[in-house]
Amino acid sequence: MNDTTKRSKNEPATPEQENDSAFAAEMEELKRDMHTAQLLDWLQNNRQLLIAAAVAVLIALAGASLWIEHGKSQKNSAATLYHQALAAASDDDKRAMLELVIKDYGDTGYGSLAHLYMVKLGDRETHLKALIHGSGSTAELASQARLDLAEWYLSNGKVDEAKAILSEPVGKQYEQLRHYLMAEATSDAGEKVMHLKKALDASSNDAFLKSRIESMISELDATS
């Protein structure tokens, strides 16, 4: 086909071509209208479900916000009561307020702090056990409470109870004291030396205790 038979780019479209373009545009518009109609129809049919879902989301958000505010309020109230207890003039007043902290705010960190303070004022065994098993206690606090309870059992002649609580491992930083107490809890010389040597090999944070362990090992070696 030569240039004389080709239509120029600037040549206007024929009526047939204009009709085709108009038809294509109308079809696209119709498709958009159909999609819009289908969406509106779906929204209409599921209106109640959508409303219920929206309400549920709003209730959940409101509940979460209230729970967060409640938690903050609980912590603030616990902190206020705990510090009032520490400032109380008499041990009886301290004890009464700390018991309220434990009763009303036991699941907060201040509940654990109250138990820790009550070890000196109340039933030592009860409060140390609460620190060992309490959900608000850190691993470090629970380990220290376990060893304090074992030491208290030994000082009161409750050797079996001490052995039972010392049978469970504690954090690495507490293993030296645990093995030292296990050595104290046994009358068997061989077992005592074994625990003392394990204590000596463990991480040490107490120079006096380490020196005490070394002296005990030397004494036992000298008598064996």
Image (cartoon, grey):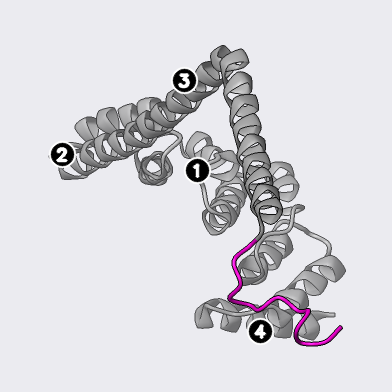
Q: Residues under labels 1 and 3: Cα distance?
A: 35 Å
Q: Earlier in the sequence, mark 2 or mark 4?
A: 2
Q: Is 85 in front, or is 105?
A: 105
Q: Earlier in the sequence, mark 3 or mark 2?
A: 3
**Residue at 72% of width from left, 60% of height from top?**
182
Residue beneath label 1, please? 136
Viewer-nearest of labels 1 and 4?
Answer: 1
Residue beneath label 3, please? 55
For the image, the number of numbered tags is 4
- Could you tell me residue 145's position as x and y percent? 54, 51
Q: Are marks 2 and 4 in contact (CB under 8 Å)?
A: no
Residue beneath label 2, please? 88
Packing grade of label 1 (10 A; few <14, some 14-19, many >=20) is some
Q: Is 27 in front, or is 168?
A: 27
Q: Quadrant of the N terminus?
A: bottom right
Give the extent of the magenta segment: 1-13
Q: Amino acid at mark 4?
A: Glu
Q: Amino acid at mark 3?
A: Val
| Above/below status of 222 relative to 31 | below
Q: Residues under labels 3 and 2: Cα distance?
A: 49 Å
Q: Quadrant of the C terminus?
A: bottom right
Q: Secondary structure at mark 1?
A: loop
In the displayed orientation, state which residue is furthest to the front. 4
Q: Is residue 106 left or right of residue 27?
A: left
Q: Earlier in the sequence, mark 3 or mark 4?
A: 3
